[in-house]
Amino acid sequence: MITINTYSQDHIATDEIKSDVINFLFESLEQYGDPKKDIEKCLDYAFGKNNKPGGMVISAIHSENQKMVGAVIINKTGMDGYIPENILVYIATDKNMRGKGVGKQLMQTAIDLSEGDMALHCEPDNPAKFLYEKLGFTSKYLEMRLKK
């Protein structure tokens, strides 16, 4: 049994929960992850720190052992129409819980609670790509970046 918890500017997580989310995402994202400091910046953005537009954090907790088995961070873009209002920045499930519906439950919660359109970035070889497509996400553009 999984319990889903949501946090936002109106329901900010404790420092312990924030730390748990950062550590969980850092460990669980594996080759698709970022440094902890970048995950923390994204989390701060979701909670509206420094007057950012905000967003939400969703965690999945295993009911038996109270261990985090999934997490999502969504940031509001502050734009609508020409760019989706939300970007799903991070999503991960515990490697022992993959294929058991946790990711789908997290994604559906994120979709249901977000107002407006949502975008996400996905590596072409990421197995989660199939879940995103099942939930209605499409590849509209090829993303190109200039790193300075």
Image (cartoon, helix red, strand yellow):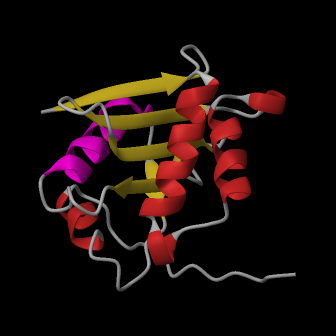
Residue 28 shown left or right of residue 48 in the figure: left
Q: Quadrant of residue 113?
A: top left
Whether residue 88 is situated above or below residue 120 in the rendered picture:
above
Q: Quadrant of residue 134?
A: bottom left
Nearer to me, 144 or 32: 32
Q: Residue at x 48, y 67 (%)?
A: 121
Whether residue 102 is situated above or below residue 27 in the rendered picture:
above
Residue extending farthest to the front is 65
Q: Position of residue 8 (x, y in %)?
A: 54, 24
Q: Residue at x 25, y 52 (%)?
A: 103
Residue extending farthest to the right is 148
Whether residue 13 is situated above or below residue 115 in the rendered picture:
above
Residue 69 shown left or right of residue 51 in the figure: left
Q: Residue at x 20, y 29 (%)?
A: 63
Q: Quadrant of the N terminus?
A: top left
Q: Can residue 145 be seen?
A: yes
Q: Quadrant of residue 67?
A: top left
Whether residue 26 is situated above or below residue 148 in the rendered picture:
above
**Which residues make up the magenta segment?**
101-115
